[in-house]
Amino acid sequence: MLKNLYIKNFILIDSINLQFNDGFSVFTGETGAGKSIFIDGISILTGSKMTTSMIKQGCNKAIIEGEFSLTDEIKEKLNEAGFDDETLIISREINQEGKSSTRVNQRACSVSFIKDLLSDYVDIHCQHDNQYLLNNKYHLDLLDKYCSNDSLLQQVNSLYKQYMQLQNEYDKLNNTTFSLAQLEIIKYQLDELENANLSNMNEDEEISKQLKEFASLEKNQKIIDQLYDLFESDDGIISKLYQFNKLADNLSNFDSIKEEIHNILDCYYAINDDFDSIKSKMKESVIDENTLNELNERLYLLQRLKRKYNTSLAGLIQLKNQLKQQLQQYDDRELILDQLSKKIEIAKQSYLEKANLLHDIRCNKSNELSEKIMEQLKDLSLPNAVFKVDINADQLTNKGIDRVEFLISMNKGVSLSPLNKVASGGELSRLMLGLKVIFANLQGSKLVIFDEIDTGVSGKVAFNIGVKMAQLSKDIQVFAVTHLSSVSACGKYHYLISKDSNDTTTTSNIVLLDKQQRIQQLAILSSSNITQSSLSAAEELLAKGQAIC
């Protein structure tokens, strides 16, 4: 439910801060007082467009903020998006430069996010609006929600995807034909790619790395040659150490330096071993001219193929496999088509088995749904209304084989027709209210707003509408903008929307009425003035509405 609404500098509203409770709240006021502005503010919280024209004249920016109670579904969406899930406070504002901001729990977010967040949470219904209940493309989903078919629907959806995947594969192969020239091109390309022995998708990068290393070795070759000369020349390090070794062997009677001589000799052997290891490793790193040419030629081939086919090495490997598959499918075309055809038939039968089960459930539950809706319409003074769920099993979709449309006849002798063909505004309003009593909970709605849908009705019918809204509010928070005293009397809470004007500005305001104020407002709604008799009638009407609701 909507717990709190704060609006500042919005069209005619200076500033309001309203606390709401669950149940049925009614909003009344004279024409032009700003009742639609109040609904527009809530609509903006659910993602409607906010423009600079909505900023109250003379103000810098408009602000709308609302706090909603949390549901498990809302918590899950908040968690998935990384938002705090302890509260749900949505804030929107726009300044004169057109810069707007949208926040959830004080963190910036996109408008599309709050649209998704509250898509089923808030249901705003205005007379004659083109909403989901009137649109037959939603009727199948509404029936399934009533049937609680989620598990079976998932199975049907999965089986349909498997069936369509096989069918698409069959159609693609069946519709694929190659001319002799095309076949020659495919064979030529395949031969070219296979002859290139493509297997390693990183081969070009590895060759480039090798060539860079070899280039670095070649650049340092002079230094390497100098190192060899220092060690191996006739006057080099190894030769000098060898001479030292020979001379040291001839020393005698010098026990005091014997240990040092021994250490130098050990160093000689260690240096000699390390130098041999260096030479061995350098020989491994040296590349001959033939190997270098082979690497350059290989890299050139790979680069040429990548340019020719405008793809990466991984793409070339994938293309090679695709060409091979095309030729294989072409050669084994009839065999593969026959195998696919058998798989398609098996997949189709598996799908139809579940889809027919789904169809039977829908047919059985549709009669129950029709009866419940006609009970609602009877309560709304439409005793002759006939409602029918029309089901035609004539298609294959991911939702089954059924096309569903809700049909209605309001009067005896009148044939059934689609909901959006109902002409009378008063009848349509009652029909929509009856449907919402059934479907609002199924849709997951937590706040349903009726904006003057009682236009065109009066007397007993109007009172019955108020009673029905009050019944709906036992499960869902209900707001109703109305001009009828009979509907207003059924509200648990009554808010008055008024406006004040002076020479320069007009301001709208919303206040919660106490019991005495409600009686006065009901008297005004009923007779346009306050007299003792109108107050008595209003008090009686309020008592009746509160007692029944």
Image (spheres, rainbow, N blue to C red):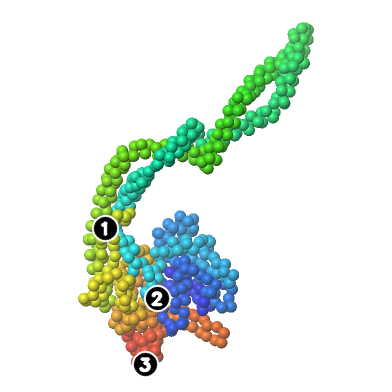
Q: Toward the viewer: 240 or 86?
A: 240
Q: What kind of element bears circle 3? A: helix
What is the C-alpha distance between the residues marked 3 and 2? 31 Å
Number of numbered discs: 3
Whether residue 299 is situated above or below residue 407 in the rendered picture: above
Of residues 32 and 243, the one nearer the viewer is 32
Tag 1: amino acid: Asp
Per the image, the residue denoted by label 1 is: 394
Q: Identify the residue shown where x is 50% and y is 32%.
A: 196
Q: Nearer the viewer, residue 470 or 363?
A: 363
Q: Percent from the top left, x then y, of residue 509?
A: 49, 80
Question: Does 42 sit above or below residue 302?
Answer: below
Q: Quadrant of the N terminus?
A: bottom left
Residue to which mark 3 is pinned: 532
Considering only order in the chain, which callout, 2 or 1, is on the residue closer to the N terminus?
A: 1
Identity, as a three-letter code, of the amino acid under mark 3 = Gln
Q: Picture coordinates of residue 32 (x, y %)?
A: 46, 82
Determine the residue located farthest toward the left in the rendered image: 413
Residue 469 x/y as whole percent: 33, 74
